Image (cartoon, rainbow, N blue to C red):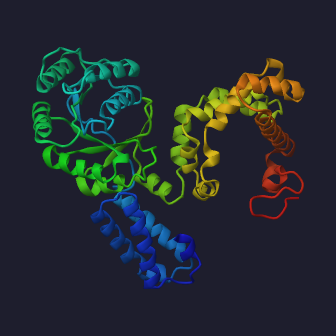
């Protein structure tokens, strides 16, 4: 849509109306609630048909900015909203939501985050007496997170467990008590009555609603029901790395009036992030999220190993062991598709590839191939000839063609590193990317370099 608008000299009301029709369809397709879509489209249309766009040199860019600003507003305004821990310790955090939304796992993730990042003493308590082994599951998550959990006493009611958790928290000097309530397969009065009783008993500083981003409109209905019954102070969206378009995130603020505070993306306990509306809007519009990528890298990468490999690359001593180490580092950061989403302009590249080249199985295959090589072969890939390739292919469950592709990629990478080393930073800045390309090589869609 923006590409089409960019070609116009100025925008007419008809142009804006056509663009808004596309936006409306895209949002409805992404499971955004209809009232939120109507409000969003109205806001954008009012801003877009004004003089600020009609007099603009680049209408496409102007509308992109207006849509971006409206998206940020709909998602709750710029800046992450932290958990409210400003209360007399132990601060109760009440976790609510339907069964299967990821509530128990999210409780463990928040406990780990508060214990490691905030240096808080956290107690986890399961109030779920409905689901078999739910209390045992939270106990195991607590062990993985390295935080204490409330000992299980069979036969107690959820309200009795909540009371015991708060007493333990006060007696043993805990900063935060996370109360994981029971869910149901659907909203019913018994569930709401139970949550209301627990809320009255504990007076939580935060009532966090956990919703699955994959459930679309159902997530919005769940949010509305819980908000009306018990009041919600914040939302945690889980499975944000799934195939769903995540349109429910756009509806949450409008439906509950509460901000999305955290998002989960995976089963690992450290897969929890603060929700930054401006970054999410940027990713939706293909503007990237460089700040988010830097934070993810800072949290997951081994910087000492990265620096060591970078130095070897610059000295032209980079070998296949180093390449395997780099693959392991990338794997720690999650899916390649997710990483590309954070880079500006990569949306079109992903579209062109049809996501077929973003499969991490390529990296796993490369790891398997390198693991099947001898130490000498990893240090000096030039010695790998036909008979060695057959042996490596048999050992790694791949083909000789796979071995050839890996060696070709590694050779290209080594050649580029040598050129960077030869040119130095000044030469690279002066000659640009063309200096790194072989003679006659073409950039995508461009004329030959050199």
Above/below status of 232 relative to 181: below
Which residue is more in the foreground, 305 or 209?
A: 209
Relative to residue 87, is residue 439 drawn left or right? Answer: right
**In terms of image quadrants, where is residue 281?**
bottom left
Q: Can residue 79 be seen here?
A: yes
Which residue is more in the foreground, 217 or 12?
A: 217
Q: Can residue 308 be seen here?
A: no
Above/below status of 155 relative to 350: above
Pinpoint residue 26: horizontal percent, then vertical percent: 43, 64
**In terms of image quadrants, where is residue 39?**
bottom left
The residue at the point 79 percent across, 46 percent down is 425
Relative to residue 389, is residue 105 drawn left or right? Answer: left
Above/below status of 56 relative to 443: below
Which residue is more in the foreground, 226 or 81?
A: 226
**In terms of image quadrants, where is residue 40?**
bottom left
Pinpoint residue 74: horizontal percent, then vertical percent: 34, 60
Relative to residue 372, is residue 21 drawn left or right? Answer: left
Above/below status of 28 relative to 274: below
Which residue is more in the foreground, 214 or 153?
A: 214
Looking at the rendered structure, the number of numbered marks drawn on it comes to 0
The residue at the point 24 percent across, 48 percent down is 223
Pinpoint residue 233: horizontal percent, then vertical percent: 23, 44
Q: Quadrant of the C terminus?
A: bottom right
Pinpoint residue 309: horizontal percent, then vertical percent: 72, 30
């Amino acid at each position: 849509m923006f590409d089409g608008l960019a070609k116009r000299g100025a925008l007419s009301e008809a142009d804006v109306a056509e663009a808004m029709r596309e936006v409306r369809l895209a949002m409805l397709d992404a499971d955004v609630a209809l009232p939120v879509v109507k409000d969003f489209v109205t806001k954008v249309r009012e801003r877009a048909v004004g003089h600020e766009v009609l007099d603009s040199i680049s209408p496409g860019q102007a509308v992109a900015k207006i849509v971006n600003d409206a998206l940020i507003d709909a998602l709750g305004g710029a800046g992450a909203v932290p958990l409210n821990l400003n209360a007399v310790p132990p601060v109760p955090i009440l976790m609510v939501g339907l069964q299967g939304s990821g509530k128990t796992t999210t409780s463990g993730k928040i406990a780990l985050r508060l214990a490691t990042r905030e240096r808080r003493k956290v107690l986890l308590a399961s109030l779920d007496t409905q689901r078999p082994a739910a209390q045992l599951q939270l106990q195991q998550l607590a062990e993985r997170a390295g935080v204490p959990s409330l000992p299980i006493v069979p036969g107690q009611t959820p309200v009795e467990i909540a009371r015991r958790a708060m007493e333990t928290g006060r007696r043993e000097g805990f900063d935060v008590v996370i109360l994981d309530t029971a869910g149901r397969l659907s909203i019913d009065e018994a569930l709401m009555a139970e949550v209301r009783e627990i809320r009255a008993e504990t007076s939580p500083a935060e009532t966090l609603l956990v919703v699955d981003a994959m459930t679309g409109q159902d997530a919005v209905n769940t949010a509305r029901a819980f908000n009306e019954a018990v009041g919600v102070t914040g939302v945690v969206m889980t499975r944000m790395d799934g195939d769903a378009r995540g349109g429910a995130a756009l509806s949450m603020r409008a439906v509950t009036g509460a901000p999305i505070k955290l998002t989960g993306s995976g089963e690992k306990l450290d897969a929890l992030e603060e929700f930054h509306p401006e970054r999410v809007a940027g990713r939706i519009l293909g503007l990237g999220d460089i700040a988010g990528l830097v934070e993810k890298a800072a949290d997951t990468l081994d910087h000492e190993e990265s620096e060591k490999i970078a130095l070897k690359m610059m000295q032209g001593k980079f070998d296949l062991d180093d390449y395997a180490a780099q693959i392991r580092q990338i794997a720690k950061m999650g899916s390649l598709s997710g990483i590309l989403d954070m880079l500006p302009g990569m949306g079109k590249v992903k579209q062109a590839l049809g996501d077929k080249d973003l499969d991490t199985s390529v990296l796993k295959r490369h790891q398997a191939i390198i693991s099947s090589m001898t130490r000498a072969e990893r240090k000096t890939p030039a010695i790998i000839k036909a008979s060695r390739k057959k042996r490596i292919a048999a050992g790694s469950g791949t083909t000789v063609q796979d071995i050839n592709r890996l060696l070709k990629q590694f050779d290209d990478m080594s050649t580029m590193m040598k050129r960077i080393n030869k040119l130095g930073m000044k030469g690279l800045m002066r000659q640009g990317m063309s200096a790194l390309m072989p003679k006659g090589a073409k950039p995508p869609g461009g004329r030959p370099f050199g």
